[in-house]
Amino acid sequence: MKQYKVGILLFNDVEVLDFAGPYEVFSITNDPENNNKPFIVSTISQTGNIITSRGGLKIISDYSFDNAPFFDILIIPGGYGAEQIEIHNNILIQWIKTQAEKAEIVASVCTGAFLLAQAGLLDNKKAVTHWMDSDRLENEFKNITVLRNVKFADESKVITSAGISSGIDMCLHIVSKLLSQAAAEITAKRMEYNLSNDLILNLHK
């Protein structure tokens, strides 16, 4: 059974649940058919130095850009750091582009969509972001169709999710997509997380 390498990007002023939610989903998922851990989760930051998240939580990443491997699944969280600072960081944007060339899935949480947009990965695609930033994404990136009132948008290789906790829904969807619906449901139950199925739009099907 394949083990997927999951990389979660970190940067200063990242929103905590944007990265912690996906980390929780992938790190505790177990494949009920093979009884194994299908995801290996790591974190990456540009320099590998201590990251200070929004709210002050300190995190040390597993890798820097210099020594990070390529990942099967790349998660780009949001927060003030994404939408106001890292969107102008050419080194980070180029790293996302390079990783995306080999990744099976590139996914954003919340305003991480702005980093994917800046990298050109959302060109001519449907996408979602935090409801407070939907107008800005639409106005600044005219070739993106911005959706509203949905938890996530699946464009096959590129998946975007709405604000903060929506990243959990998106990652459970990825579990379902790569493993099975049963695996996703077991993970959600273990997390005591209730999926909002009426707000989910799966564009891949």
Image (cartoon, helix red, strand yellow):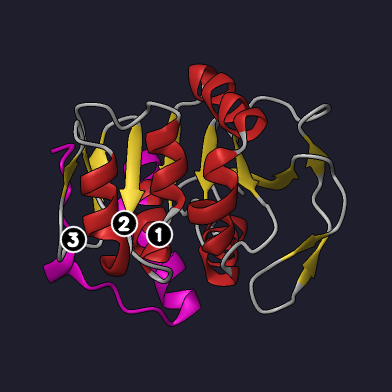
Q: Is residue 107 magenta?
A: no
Q: Residue furthest bottom?
A: 192
The disc placed on residue 200 is 3
Query: If the image is split into quadrants, where does the N terminus sit?
Result: top right
- Marks 2 and 3 sit apart, C-alpha to C-alpha, by 14 Å
Which badge, 2 or 3, comes first in the chain's sequence? 2
Residue marked by disc 2? 129
Q: Is residue 189 magenta?
A: yes
Magenta region: which residues? 176-205
Asked if one can make out residue 77 in the rendered structure from this viewpoint, the answer is: no
| Image point (41%, 76%), residue name | 189
Indicate the secondary structure of the residue bearing disc 1.
Answer: loop
Looking at the image, is 1 positioned above or below residue 39?
above
Marks 2 and 1: in contact by CB < 8 Å? yes
- Of the residues shown, which amino acid type is indicated by label 2? Thr
Looking at the image, is 62 positioned above or below residue 170?
above
| Image point (64%, 72%), residue name | 54
| Image point (19%, 35%), residue name | 142
The disc placed on residue 110 is 1
Mark 1 packing: few (<14 Cα in 10 Å), some, or many (20+)? many
Q: Would you say 159 lies left or right of 30 here?
A: left
- Marks 1 and 2 sit apart, C-alpha to C-alpha, by 5 Å
Marks 3 and 2: in contact by CB < 8 Å? no
